[in-house]
Image (cartoon, grey):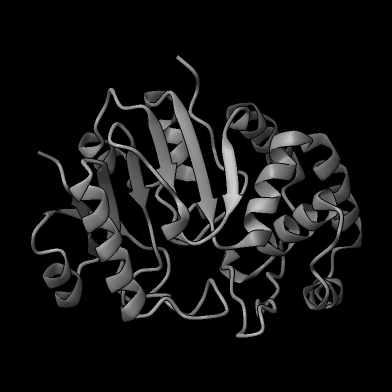
């Protein structure tokens, strides 16, 4: 049995710590695994072996470009990261935030991975103009050895996996597929990850999309906040409470929901 992979991207809200609570609700024996809010990908790496095929996507082009670069050439990305490590400083970090994009996917990936690793609490944040707005994480070094280890292993697991950029509504799963959705949570981070906030209209749009999946017989699971709005929105589906320990915020333990159309 393959060892568990650790994601190469730190991601606030990732499912690494609670994957064991979610996995029992994931069906087996289906064909393709879809995850259209990819983020750090922690959950994908945990359940990869349960499915024959995999289609990953995210609206964040920087993120999906980084995944594809690591998938194709992790060694080249690491070399660029070493250059960042040599130049690392608060001033360098602030300057790179102004011009993080590049025509070379390897360079863009290295920029993205460096900025995310060296940001305060490793939190990805952008402005309405899609500019980075992250603070520098002082008294720390770029974890090159860990990144090399994780990127190399993740690259192997990403072989043969489709990774694209796009809105969740672009995916086209079939009846024998499974879709896991981990959107920006209601009342928690809607305006952090993308230039336009993932507001309640988007939450409703996502719910309508799950109705379409359900009508065609596609199994799905959605992670979201445990709020009255979300509970009412998904009142026709099974709602499973998941306990989460947070490292950030005033409340160390909260409940969130895993919504499924399990039968």
Q: Residue placed at 91% from the left, 62% from the top?
A: 87
In depth, the one of 61 and 142 nearer the eye is 61
The residue drawn where x is 68% and y is 60% is: 62
Q: Is residue 25 left or right of residue 38?
A: left
Residue 219 visible, this angle: yes
Query: Viewed as shown, does residue 172 lie left or right of 244?
Result: right
Q: Residue at x 68, y 33 (%)?
A: 149
Q: How many marks?
A: 0
Relative placement, left or right, of 141 versus 87 is left
Residue 163 x %, y %:
59, 44
Q: Residue at x 41, y 46 (%)?
A: 172
Quarter of image, res 94: bottom right
In the rendered image, the quadrant that contains the C terminus is top left
Residue 137 falls in which quadrant of the image? bottom right
Q: Is residue 126 above or below residue 25?
A: below
Percent coordinates x, y for residue 37 in the rendering: 46, 56
Position of residue 73 relative to residue 14, above or below, is above
**Residue furthest front as drawn:** 216
User: Where residue 261 appears, x then y in whole percent?
Assistant: 16, 47
Q: Position of residue 242 (x, y in %)?
A: 21, 53
- Res. 253 visible in picture: no
């Amino acid at each position: 049995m393959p060892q568990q992979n650790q994601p190469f991207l730190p991601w606030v809200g990732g499912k690494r710590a609670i994957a064991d609570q979610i996995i029992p609700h994931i069906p087996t024996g289906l064909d393709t695994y879809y995850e259209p809010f990819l983020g750090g990908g922690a959950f994908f790496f945990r359940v990869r072996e349960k499915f024959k095929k995999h289609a990953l996507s995210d609206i964040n082009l920087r993120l999906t470009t980084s995944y594809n670069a690591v998938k194709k050439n992790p060694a080249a990305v690491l070399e660029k990261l070493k250059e960042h490590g040599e130049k690392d400083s608060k001033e360098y970090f602030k300057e790179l935030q102004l011009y993080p994009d590049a025509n070379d996917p390897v360079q863009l990936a290295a920029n993205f991975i460096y900025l995310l690793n060296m940001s305060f609490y490793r939190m990805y944040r952008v402005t309405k103009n899609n500019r980075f707005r992250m603070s520098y994480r002082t008294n720390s070094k770029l974890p090159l050895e860990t990144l090399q280890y994780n990127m190399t292993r993740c690259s192997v697991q990403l072989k043969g996996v489709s990774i694209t950029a796009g809105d969740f509504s672009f995916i086209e799963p079939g009846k024998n597929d499974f879709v896991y959705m981990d959107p920006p949570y209601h009342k928690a981070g809607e305006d952090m990850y993308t230039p336009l906030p993932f507001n309640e209209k988007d939450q409703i749009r996502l719910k309508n999309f799950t109705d379409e999946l359900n009508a065609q017989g596609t199994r799905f699971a959605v992670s979201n906040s445990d709020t009255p709005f979300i509970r009412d929105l998904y009142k026709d589906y099974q709602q499973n409470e998941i306990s989460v320990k947070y490292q950030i915020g005033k409340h160390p333990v909260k409940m969130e929901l895993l919504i499924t159309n399990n039968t």
